[in-house]
Amino acid sequence: MHNEDLLRPVTGADDLIAPLAELNTADAVEYLNAQDREDATAVLAALPQPRAVKILEQPELRDASALVAALPPELAAALLGQMADDRATDIFHELDAAQREALLWRLGTDARLSIQKLMRYPPHTAGALMTTEFVAVPADWTVARTLQYVREVERSRETVYAIYLLDPRTRQLEQVVTMRRLITGLPETPIMEVAQVNPPIAVDPMLDQEEVARLIRRHDLLAIPVVDAGGHVLGIVTVDDILDTLIAESTEDVQKFGGVEALDKPYMHIGFGEMIRKRAGWLSVLFLGEMLTASAMQHFEDELSKAVVLTLFIPLIMSSGGNSGSQATSLLIRSLALRELRLRDWWKVALRELPTGMVLGAILGLLAIIRIAVWQNTGLYDYGAHWKMVALTIGAALVGIVTFGSLSGSMLPFVLQRLGFDPASASAPFVATLVDVTGLVIYFSIAAAILSGTLL
Amino acid sequence: MHNEDLLRPVTGADDLIAPLAELNTADAVEYLNAQDREDATAVLAALPQPRAVKILEQPELRDASALVAALPPELAAALLGQMADDRATDIFHELDAAQREALLWRLGTDARLSIQKLMRYPPHTAGALMTTEFVAVPADWTVARTLQYVREVERSRETVYAIYLLDPRTRQLEQVVTMRRLITGLPETPIMEVAQVNPPIAVDPMLDQEEVARLIRRHDLLAIPVVDAGGHVLGIVTVDDILDTLIAESTEDVQKFGGVEALDKPYMHIGFGEMIRKRAGWLSVLFLGEMLTASAMQHFEDELSKAVVLTLFIPLIMSSGGNSGSQATSLLIRSLALRELRLRDWWKVALRELPTGMVLGAILGLLAIIRIAVWQNTGLYDYGAHWKMVALTIGAALVGIVTFGSLSGSMLPFVLQRLGFDPASASAPFVATLVDVTGLVIYFSIAAAILSGTLL
């Protein structure tokens, strides 16, 4: 069976692809996402191959691997072979082993080798993100020869705007020339003369994708070369891969901060069981941690039964500790992610959070004292004969707990980074739980100190 | 005084700029960020102007406007005039009115007009983000003529990789041609023949920058044209502006979710007073809201004094509601931001969160019942004669509160969007506060129903 046969319209194929005639690629992807799998597969099979390839290359296409697996194997292999190799690799990653083998051996040798190479890199690394479809020429070529070469290979390259110049003998990366410099050069100029002067910025294939994004952004690049230890270019990471990465990372960060395992799929596309699993894990861990509050409360049972009035303010006081902690954590997570602060700066942060927490605690403490005084004096509620001491207790406890919350909330991302975790794994619920237990102990200790002899 | 005089090294200028000799632009920015303002200004003044311009164009340079203001006005104007107009505009925005006037009138007419035009657009819009330094040619030119024109203007354009083709008569945007298609075209081909076929994707200058980022990403563009109502190109937004925007938005989202006003400056560069203001506002609002818990508790004072055992579990139960709420909110914030869900989908989400919350609540409820049974039976703590009823109360309350938390946490971003706010303004502390008050009422109502006649 030849590939041409696959282009022959099957019955009804024209009807199937008619709605896509007027759509650009992004809209076509959206159209397919709205179809069920069978229809979407039929549309892909009926489309001209170059169009189908473009659609399959969009990371926004849902369940691309399932669609590919449902196509006739010959067609699937033909499409995968024409796709950008980094996207084809993404799809291969999601296929099961049997499907993967069946398709891999139907690919041409070049495509197969580059996909097999890319599949070896762990996810979230420069190696996993890169494409091998870049332009590299010997550094002793002229501008004219390079331009002619770019014209010939343009169709099969992900970008031609950065051209990598290799040592003609060792094939090591020597320099980078941008297309804009290239087209302004005189035809017979040696290409090294129009290249940039600074040494090229390159990354190791094992570098984390967040770090790759940071470098691309820092140096305003359209692509960054990935080189091995010997200085040979393995591939390039382009800025549009980085955009997708940044969006995905930012979703992950918000979800993690909310205390959920990263979903990596749209909300409505997660099965019920999977949704429960992604949420129940952390929720249960936090719950078990929070059980310590019950133990702490049991410990202060005497105080509780003697002074029920103290109970009234437990939720208020505890939530303030959690809130100030979650503020501090959110600030520090981003500062560490953006490299505004390093691990060694922890003490500078601690020295800032200590007075910040005290002032914030004093503000809330004052609000609480006013609240109690107003309720007491207007007769809205009677906090008892020792209401002034009670108000003082609440105020002092708020200073202590908000300070503790700010301090531990700000230190948590540092501790996580020190232990080798992503600082962004610090979640608001985690901070709240951390602060709650200690908060109760602070509250009752201050109460014991102030109220002993009167209420307690 | 001529500009050339400003390049004449002042005493010690060589020493000042010596450390920058080996540094690329990004590293030079980092070096300047580490200097105090006076030294940084002196370095900028001593550098060759093209180098100083490149450094000032980096958004990572801190307090760029203060540095510019501290330079001799002639030099400041010379540098601003050579900068990309979008970055120069950013700097003008941060100058005070007097400095702005003084510098604006020292600029050349072209630079002044384009900066004045850009300053009219509100922040965070396509208009505020765009540069007017793009390449546009009449649509009836040939490939050769266009390439020749690009070579001539290349130096003064932010990107030359997207070329905008205008109707020769009306100057309206007709089509876009990419540099890679241009260089592969034969010299005498009309340029419209190598242009893309789909209508060009363009945006209104008032479009929000998040939406611009979404379009650039969706269509894998290097730049997007900004057009007025008449179809004339006002400027373009490039992908590196979008990268910076995405990073800033993602910082803002995490900070807002943590319950802080967005900082828009690195943590260590915020003054103490400003830090307190950015945090105290939300913290106080949440505190006032949380005061309702004290009122709720006062309402249930009888129950509390009769059954101190109920008090022990208040922190545990309330935090579970807050945690499940913050999980749901974080999921929905991102789904709405990524347009995976629309406002009209709220009921689909509600129908998912209801059973999800019930199952999650049942899991936690079971954990709580096991905890109470174990403590009771091993003699670690005595929950009294009615311990089974107490355990049942806690378990049932958890189902109710976690369900309520998931439901209200997931609906909050929808409500905010409906009211015209950014759904990302929903913060974890806000959700927790929302759930805390209702959670207490749910807890005591269930307690009253189950324990009435025994403990209560």
Image (spheres, coloured by chain):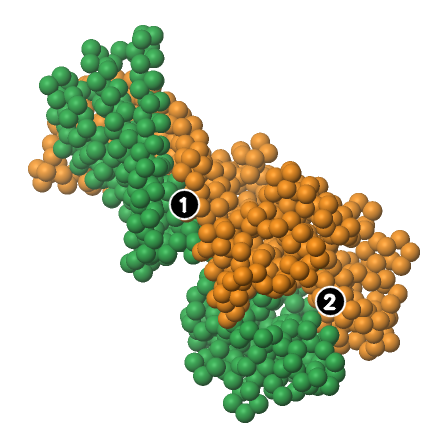
Chain colours: A green, B orange
Percent position (x, y) of residue A418?
30, 58
- Is A122 placed above or below A422 here? below
- Is B30 placed above or below B331 here? below
- Is A3 placed above or below A208 here? below
| Pointer 2 chain | B
Q: Where is the C terminus of chain A found, in terms of image quarters?
A: top left
Same chain shared by disc 1 and disc 2:
no
Q: Residues within 10 Å of mark 2 (few under 14, many from 20)?
A: some
The type of residue carrying mark 1 is: Ser
**Residue A181 visible, this orientation:** yes
Element assignment for label 2: helix
**Residue A66 visible, this orientation:** no
In front of the other: A133 or B26: B26
Q: Name the residue under label 1.
A: A330
The CA span between labels 1 and 2 is 42 Å
- Is B313 placed above or below A220 here? above
**Which residue is depicted at the point 65% across and 81% down?**
A193
Closer to us: mark 1 or mark 2? 2
In front of the other: B408 or A339: A339
Q: Mark 2 points at which residue?
A: B154
**Which residue is depicted at the point 51% across and 90% down?**
A170
Which residue appears farthest toward the right when viewing the image? B169
A259 horizontally vs A114: left or right: left
A147 horizontally vs B366: left or right: right
